[in-house]
Amino acid sequence: MSGYHINTCIGCGAKFYAEKPQFRTCPRCWCEANPDKTGRIAAGLLGMLALAEDQVQMIAGQLADLQEDRAGAGIDGDLLKRLLQLSHPDRHGNSQLATKTFQDLQRIKP
């Protein structure tokens, strides 16, 4: 993401993309700290973010199961492609879990 900075949130410690280097609070913590400014839109976005994080955790669990079940056997190319698409950090608010899962999947690419 050109023009953006990777900052660490002072509220939760998560890494996030910021438009300016002085932005030190991730969108989630900012919304939680400013409910009067964010209203229903923020609540909806937080709900979507929570759902995306749940999906990333589910995919990470599925990946761990697959890695156990198929240790040394490799993963079918089509399955790996789908897992990479589903776990891409851009689909999950660039969460640390999505990034780690995506990186793990990339390491097992043939």
Image (tube, rainbow, N blue to C red):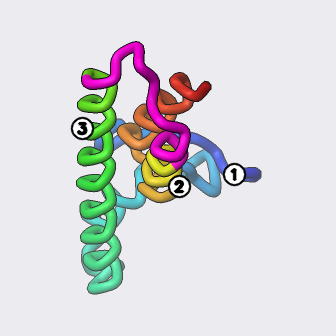
Three-letter amino acid code of the residue under disc 2: Asp
Q: Measured along the vertical axis of the image, is residue 83 above or below residue 55?
A: above
Q: Name the residue tied to disc 3.
A: 61
Residue extending farthest to the right is 2
Q: In which quarter of the image is the C terminus?
A: top right
Viewer-nearest residue: 85 or 34: 85
Residue 38's x, y, as percent? 34, 79
Mark 2 element type: helix
Residue extending farthest to the bottom is 40
Q: Name the residue tied to disc 2.
A: 90
Q: Measured along the vertical axis of the image, is residue 92 above or below residue 83?
A: below
Residue 72 falls inside the magenta stretch: yes
Q: Name the residue tied to disc 1.
A: 1
Residue 108's x, y, as percent? 52, 24
Three-letter amino acid code of the residue under disc 3: Gly
Three-letter amino acid code of the residue under disc 1: Met
Q: Which of marks 2 and 1 is in front?
A: 2
Q: Which of marks 2 and 3 is nearer the N terminus?
A: 3
* Label 3 crowd bin: few (<14), some (14–19), many (20+), radius 10 Å: few
Residue 92's x, y, as percent? 42, 55
The magenta segment: 69-81
Viewer-nearest residue: 10 or 4: 4
